Image (cartoon, rainbow, N blue to C red):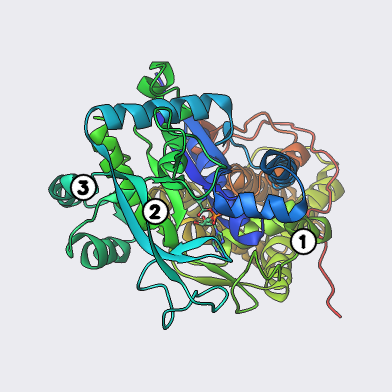
């Protein structure tokens, strides 16, 4: 039986259409999911949308539509974006799905019935015009951080989750599972800033807005977003109504999130799961933020382009490649169209595209596109073959430690060495001498075989391009096991005509 791998992205707020920051997480998760599928796992890749809450209610009111109508439109757009980016999710959860709503209600009732949720009084600072609650540390000189007006101390009845009860067990879990939170700096942040000072019980209901899942036994209250949102990772698997998928996929192997929501995933979520007596996720990875031309990407400022504009201009794999390659995973990074163009030109058009086109064109020119097996092998060849064969394990090691950009760079390095191999062996010179025909065939074979192996290893990252390359090679040897050995390319294979994979993008 295949080993399982359950990977998730955050469920994004559909308060506005998604931007390149949302694409960033979703593309990385997609490439990990695809890599795991390629290497033989039974993968469940989930993404979705977090649709309730005051902000969405307000946005819908401003737009003069119902909250449901408002989110439906954005979700349609989001699904279309994921399709354009070749996102291979297995499940798209919406927190307005009736299954999710019913299951969250059951989770809330269960926690209440067992005493983990209780009724108390919420005290906070409220900005009446903005209809927003703030904490002491958020307000600026007694004023609302959003609009600058006076805030008022208010108290309202609310339900609370006993987070404090789970503090010790949580710390113990961190200690016993050193890889639970990555990068390690984020774990220290959680301990120093939130856990060690003492966890406070968490307010989990509101009466100030309506757009949410009502508390069944007290319908003036709606369930406040984090209980609703975090539960998505298990309600999608049927919890608490159905065990089949839960038994198969839970606990999650990887929750991939942006660094600002690590806290919710590594404190609130594990405590909720402990209360429900469920195993905890194996790993939460908090990646850095993508800035846009050095500044914050802001939904409220709307200072960003629709990501489809980049896809239409440069191609889906250029965008995927750039998102995966540019930023060391875990650090903050910058997105700029100039850097996207430059990456596409150097890595995709020059290194990869040229290599594939040159090699296939030469095979057509010198051997009418027919592949012949290698005969004359030299040290130069042995070196190339050694590097190509080592790639599988190197990529595996990098992917297992989520160093996606380094995994890709290793493949690029081998592709660069293939280009160098062409320059060193100068096939066009050999072609002039009939006695060197066998040597020429060997060189082309080695190149084609290297390209085949690299194309398979690139398939999680740039799936369309990988498919195009393998289609040009016309080979049936495309599965993961086939890259364990060199010399797998079929004898007398007839190559298809070369295609241009990436055109060099000219800048003004
Ligand atoms: O927080 N750089 O939703 P959200 C990198 N609904 N990643 C970015 C990014 C950027 N500039 N901007 C957004 C929520 N992201 C909650 C989550 S989960 C149970 C509930 C990505 O729409 C990144 O993954 O604000 C970040 O954590 C997420 O989008 C926030 O999305």
Quadrant of res 479: top right
- Residue 297 visible in the current orientation: yes
Per the image, the residue denoted by label 3 is 177
Image coordinates for residue 219, horizontal then vertical, percent: 46, 33
The 10 Å Cα crowd at callout 2, few under 14, some 14 to 19, many 20 or more, is many
Q: Is residue 66 above or below residue 99?
A: below
Relative horizontal placement of residue 60, taking residue 366 as reference (left or right): left
Depth order, front residue of 456/66: 66
Q: Is mark 3 within 8 Å of ligand 1?
A: no
How far across and how far down the image is residue 397, in percent? 38, 50
Q: Is residue 96 above or below residue 202?
A: above
Residue 424: percent from left, percent from top: 65, 67
Closer to the camera in the image, 48 or 57: 57
Alpha-carbon neighbours of circle 1 within 10 Å: few (<14), some, or many (≥20)? some
Q: Quadrant of the C terminus?
A: bottom right
Which quadrant: the N terminus? top left
| Rendered position, 377 above or below 123 | above
Q: Please report whichever mark, 2 or 3, sits nearer to the chain's N-terminal start.
A: 3
Distance from label 3 to label 1 (Cα)?
40 Å
Label disc, if present, on residue 310 of the rendered structure: 1
Horizontal arrangement in the rendering, residue 422 relative to residue 215 (left or right):
right
Q: Which mark is residue 302?
A: none
* Residue in the image at 20% along x and 51% along y: 174
Q: Which residue is mark 2?
A: 285
Q: Are marks 2 and 3 in contact (CB under 8 Å)?
A: no
Horizontal side, residue 398 vs residue 193: left or right: right
């Amino acid at each position: 039986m295949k080993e399982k791998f359950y990977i998730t992205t955050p469920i994004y707020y559909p308060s506005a259409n998604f931007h390149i920051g949302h694409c960033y997480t979703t593309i990385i998760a997609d490439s990990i999911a695809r890599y795991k599928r390629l290497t033989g796992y039974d993968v469940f890749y989930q993404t979705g949308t977090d649709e309730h809450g005051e902000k969405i209610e307000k946005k819908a009111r401003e737009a003069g539509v119902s909250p449901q109508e408002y989110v439906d439109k954005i979700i349609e757009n989001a699904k279309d974006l994921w399709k354009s980016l070749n996102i291979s999710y297995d499940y798209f959860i919406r927190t307005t799905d009736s299954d999710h709503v019913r299951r969250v209600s059951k989770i809330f009732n269960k926690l209440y019935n067992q005493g983990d949720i209780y009724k108390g009084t919420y005290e906070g600072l409220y900005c009446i015009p903005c209809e927003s609650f703030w904490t002491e540390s958020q307000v600026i000189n007694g004023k609302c951080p959003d609009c600058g007006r006076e805030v008022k101390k208010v108290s309202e009845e609310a339900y609370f989750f006993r987070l404090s009860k789970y503090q010790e067990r949580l710390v113990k879990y961190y200690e016993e599972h050193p890889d639970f939170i990555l990068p390690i700096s984020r774990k220290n942040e959680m301990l120093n800033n939130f856990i060690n000072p003492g966890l406070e019980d968490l307010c989990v209901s509101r009466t100030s807005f309506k757009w949410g899942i009502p508390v069944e036994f007290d319908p003036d209250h709606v369930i406040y977003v984090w209980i609703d949102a975090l539960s998505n990772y298990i309600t999608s698997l049927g919890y608490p109504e159905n065990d089949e998928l839960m038994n198969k996929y839970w606990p999650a192997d990887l929750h991939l999130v942006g660094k600002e929501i690590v806290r919710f995933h590594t404190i609130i979520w594990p405590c909720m799961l402990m209360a429900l007596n469920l195993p905890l996720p194996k790993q939460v990875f908090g990646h850095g933020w993508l800035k846009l031309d050095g500044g914050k990407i802001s939904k409220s400022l709307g200072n960003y382009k629709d990501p489809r504009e980049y896809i239409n201009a440069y191609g889906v794999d250029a965008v995927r490649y750039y998102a995966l390659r540019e930023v060391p995973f875990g650090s903050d990074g910058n997105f700029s169209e100039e850097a996207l163009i430059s990456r596409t030109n150097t890595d995709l058009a020059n290194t990869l595209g040229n290599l594939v086109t040159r090699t296939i064109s030469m095979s057509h020119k010198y051997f009418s596109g027919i592949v012949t097996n290698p005969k004359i092998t030299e040290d130069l060849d042995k070196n190339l073959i050694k590097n190509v064969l080592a790639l599988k394990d190197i990529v595996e090691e990098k992917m297992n430690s989520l160093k996606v950009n380094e995994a890709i760079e290793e493949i690029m390095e081998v592709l660069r060495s293939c280009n160098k191999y062409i320059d060193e062996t100068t096939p066009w010179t050999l072609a002039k001498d009939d006695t060197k025909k066998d040597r020429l065939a060997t060189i082309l074979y080695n190149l084609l075989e290297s390209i085949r192996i690299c194309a398979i290893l690139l398939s999680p990252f740039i799936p369309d391009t990988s498919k195009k390359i393998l289609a040009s090679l016309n080979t049936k040897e495309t599965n993961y096991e086939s890259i364990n050995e060199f010399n797998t390319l079929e004898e007398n294979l007839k190559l298809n005509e070369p295609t241009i994979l990436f055109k060099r993008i000219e800048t003004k």
